[in-house]
């Protein structure tokens, strides 16, 4: 089978990817499905940990295949599974947060991370949902209720486009940030208020919005562009608000920020609002089941930036690393779709 692999991340993971054409098929355990891969959705987690100086060496080893988000067909179901040969499925190719393995023509995926695709839903629409959908769900749904005032920093990326729609499904009032070119997109997804970060500092706009319409009850940061969004959160949020950071990385600056936000009290230079870092758990099926149901019902419409053919996976990663993708970047492993913008 064909599989993309890398044995180093020096100079960037994408510059070390090699398309192997004679890789053996994976041998699933009794608790894994053998899946013929149709589509793979790319995420920052596919390269950020691997490119970290220390963690990366543990991941790469003798060679690794990137990719967590997968949509495909069951070839051999796991023992005792209700899924059957030929059934369309989606989910995470691995439960290991440091190693994916989806960017190949076949993958062996754990039972607990794979779900059936609802009838009538295009596999490409769910191929990018496992990481982004679960992240948006987990950073919002447990904390908000109808009428909650929510701010999402970064509304046009993969997680942000899911976040806007999930928050609206929950009945929240949603304010998001994005650049000028994506304002209309965010509004079309349901955002009640859109802040253009190219117009003036987001913190100033948030304070003005809070003064005009009331403080925010919940904040999700998909960007990590300005630590003061947390340290000054008390100037635009309610006393009980929570600030959730999802744009994590193994970088020293982020680790310092996360530790400070979690440990330091306000009088020692920490923030004055509750803080947590969210990491998606691919083993939790409920969020993915809900996202898939909402997609089928038309309440959530996945946004795809571009679909790249299997042979252009390197270009797909380069697009991902620009940080300018609108929605999800998908790799068409099975040759199902033509490249599209």
Image (cartoon, rainbow, N blue to C red):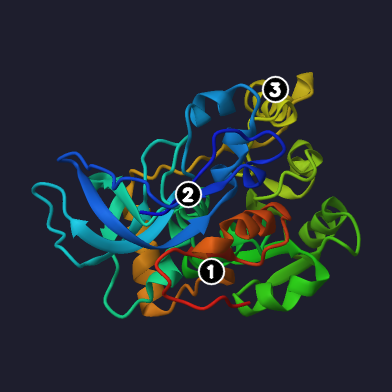
Residue 135's place in the image compared with 333, above or below, is: above
The residue labelled by disc 2 is 67
Q: Of label 3 and label 2, which has the lower sequence position?
A: 2
Cα gap from disc 3 to disc 1, whole angstroms: 33 Å
- Nearest the viewer among 173 and 67 is 67
Residue neighbourhood size for the residue with mark 1, other residues' Cα within 10 Å, grouped as few (<14), some (14–19), many (≥20) = many
Element type at marker 3? loop
Image position, residue 50 (x, y; %): 58, 34
Image position, residue 309 (x, y; %): 52, 68
| Quarter of the figure with residue 228 | top right
The residue labelled by disc 1 is 165
Q: Is residue 163 left or right of residue 131?
A: right
User: Which quadrant of the rendered structure holds the C terminus?
Assistant: bottom right
Q: Are marks 3 and 1 in contact (CB under 8 Å)?
A: no
Q: Nearer the viewer, mark 3 or mark 2?
A: 2
Q: Residue at x 66, y 67 (%)?
A: 326
- Residue 188 is at least partly visible in this image: yes
The residue labelled by disc 3 is 265
Q: Of label 2 and label 1, which has the lower sequence position?
A: 2
Element type at marker 1? helix
Residue neighbourhood size for the residue with mark 3, other residues' Cα within 10 Å, grouped as few (<14), some (14–19), many (≥20) = few
- Nearest the viewer among 184 and 89 is 89
Q: Nearer the viewer, mark 2 or mark 1?
A: 2
- Nearest the viewer among 121 and 51 is 51
Residue 102's place in the image compared with 87, above or below, is: above
Q: Of label 3 and label 1, which has the lower sequence position?
A: 1
Q: Is residue 53 left or right of residue 292?
A: right
């Amino acid at each position: 089978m064909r599989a993309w692999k890398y044995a180093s991340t020096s100079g960037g993971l994408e510059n070390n990817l090699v398309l192997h054409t004679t890789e053996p098929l994976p041998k699933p355990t009794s608790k894994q499905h053998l899946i013929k891969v149709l589509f793979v959705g790319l995420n920052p987690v596919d390269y950020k940990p691997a490119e970290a100086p220390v963690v990366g060496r543990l991941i790469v080893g003798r060679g690794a295949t990137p990719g967590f988000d997968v949509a495909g067909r069951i070839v051999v179901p796991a023992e005792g599974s209700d899924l059957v040969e030929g059934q369309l499925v989606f989910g995470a190719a691995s439960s290991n947060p440091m190693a994916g393995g989806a960017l190949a023509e076949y993958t062996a995926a754990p039972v607990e991370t794979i779900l059936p695709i609802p009838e009538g839903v295009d596999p490409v629409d769910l191929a990018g949902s496992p990481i982004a959908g679960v992240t948006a769900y987990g950073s919002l749904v447990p904390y908000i209720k109808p009428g909650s005032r929510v701010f999402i920093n970064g509304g046009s990326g993969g997680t942000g486009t899911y976040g806007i729609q999930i928050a609206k499904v929950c009945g929240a009032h949603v304010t998001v940030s994005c650049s000028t070119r994506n304002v209309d997109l965010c509004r079309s997804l349901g955002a009640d208020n859109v802040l253009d970060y190219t117009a003036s500092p987001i913190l100033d706009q948030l304070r003005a919005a809070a003064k005009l319409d009331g403080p925010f009850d919940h904040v999700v940061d998909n960007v990590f562009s300005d630590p003061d969004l947390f340290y000054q959160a008390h100037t635009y949020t309610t006393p009980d608000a929570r600030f959730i950071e999802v744009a994590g990385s193994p970088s020293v600056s982020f680790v310092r920020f996360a530790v400070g936000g979690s440990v330091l009290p306000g009088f020692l230079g920490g923030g004055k609002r509750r803080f947590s870092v969210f990491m998606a758990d691919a083993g939790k099926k409920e969020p993915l089941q809900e996202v898939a149901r909402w997609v089928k019902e038309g309440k959530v419409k996945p946004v795809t930036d571009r679909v790249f053919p299997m042979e252009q996976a390197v270009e797909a990663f380069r697009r991902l690393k620009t940080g300018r993708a609108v929605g999800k970047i998908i790799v068409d492993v099975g040759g199902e779709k033509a490249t599209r913008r």
